[in-house]
Amino acid sequence: MSSLNELLGLFETIDGERSVTEKLKRLHSWSVESPEVYDTRMICFDSIDLGEEQEFAYIAPAKDTGLFPTEPSIINGHSPLPPHLFPEEVRKHVSVYYPFFNPGGELQGALLIKARDPKKYLKSRQETLGMIASKSRDILEIASLRKRIRPQKSTENTALSPDLMFKVLDMLQLPLYVMDRNGRFLSVNRTFLDTFSYIDLREVNKTGNFFIDQEDWGRSILELAEMNGSQGYTSRVRTGTGSIKVVKDFSITMGQNTMGILFDITSSVQINEQLQESLDSQTELNRKLMSTSSNLKKTQATTIKSLANLAEYRDMETGDHLHRICEYNRVLTSQVYKHQPYVFNISEDYVDDIYFSGMLHDIGKVAVPDSILLKNDSLDTQEWGVMQKHTRWGWSILNDADRELGEQSFLTLATRIALSHHERWDGSGYPEKLGGDDIPLSARITAVADVYDALTSRRPYKDPWPHERAMEEIRSLSGSHFDPVLIELLGSVEDDFFMIRQNSVN
């Protein structure tokens, strides 16, 4: 196993393969090319369907997981592995064992390597083995997740493990639930509990009928199952405080279970009722109703179309960071809308769209190896080159979903922000060295927000800067790093930036 550039090339080749089997074949072929290695195998402790039987991979029974080490080690002939796992000519050699874990912290699999000098190999290849193990874990986790979120018509019960989806939906602040055929909630995420005022899952189930019209809801979910969640069902739910909310439920069936995302449309319904009661306020209320419906449609589209691609987001930024970026974007974009300083005008909807879009600005970091993404020190030149690729990887993830929508949406802005938020006004940024007005406005705005938040946040290599010093630095970069028009507008909302920062800290 060799340099970081070679590993990056290998990972790009693996990502280009469509099936899990072909991805693992590529990994095996590459590993045995090393003169230090006799042969390798992958041990899987999960129910992954590899298609036809493969000589380079072995699926161990789930009950045997506890028999294997949870630390990198050297394994001699005494192990729960079958003796025929390796060809006869290399069986006598001991194996280097390197485990990897699923997002829940459970042992998911391991690399098994017959090396010429196992102890030396394990000691000298720790970093490389960690990256290979991380990639192996991601391949298996994505395969498992895609299999589990694919709607099924079978009556066979499906084991659910939606941890990654919960993380993504918590980031987007969307309430998610999983329910069995008997109406019992199997799992809900934090946003669900906060939205509907419940303490925990047990309290939700204790209410009896969360869905007030439980029977009507059940029949409608079955009718909509064939639509794969593309049509929502309006229902009434009971909150933990005893109040009633009206929700739009977008669900898919998973075996005999149901996974759903709930959108609170109580305000929309109330506005609609007021429209019927008062002709005098019809114009204003109708505007509010259309705005609410528009936001609901955009959020629904992004959630449904992006779930699968966002599933491997394993090291997301903190919720506070994402919230601040969104708020900074909203404040600065509101000034652009108010003054309209460019040859083009932006709409009021643009202010809301960029708020949601900013949440996904660094989504491409899902493809950055753990050894770089989680490093507690400055990156060297090679590592920085890999880190810079997160802009293109983010664009690729979001653009696939955006093309399926077939229309302009806040996801369109998200693709532009993900690709270009590290470009600089003078053309010295990355990845395309765009300059001036060639940089999308959404990316220029997010660049200001991102740099301010980075300067005022603690990092492993620096203490947080005070607000005044951060603003002075940003102003000094007007015309080089940042759009000078935006920096001029920033002057009128500096206090807003400071309050957003302070409220997040407090």
Image (cartoon, helix red, strand yellow):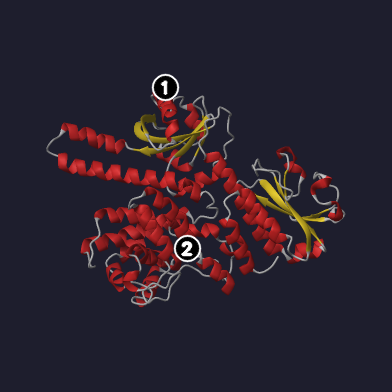
Question: In what element is the residue under mark 2?
Answer: helix
In the picture, which quadrant includes the N terminus? bottom right
Q: Seen in the image, is 252 located left or right of residue 460?
A: left
Q: Is residue 158 above or below residue 17?
A: above
Residue 357, x across and y down, in percent: 38, 55
Which sits earlier in the primary sequence, circle 2 or circle 1? 1
- Check disc 2: other Cα within 10 Å, few if <14, some if 14-19, many if 20+: some
386 or 206, nearer to the observer: 386
Question: In what element is the residue under mark 1?
Answer: helix
Residue drawn at the location 68% of the way across and 63% of the way down: 128
Q: Given this view, does label 2 or label 1 mark the residue nearer the observer?
A: 2
Q: Is residue 506 visible?
A: no
Give the labeled residue for mark 1: 215
Residue drawn at the location 43% of the way across and 68% of the way down: 422
Residue 164, x across and y down, in percent: 54, 46
Q: Is residue 2 visible?
A: yes
Amino acid residing under circle 2: Arg
**Quarter-wise, where is residue 460 in the image?**
bottom right
Give the labeled residue for mark 2: 392
Identify the mark at residue 124; answer none if there is no mark. none
Amino acid residing under circle 1: Glu
Residue 432, x across and y down, in percent: 43, 70
Residue drawn at the location 17% of the way across and 31% of the way down: 277
118 or 284, nearer to the observer: 118
Q: Is residue 196 above or below residue 452?
A: above
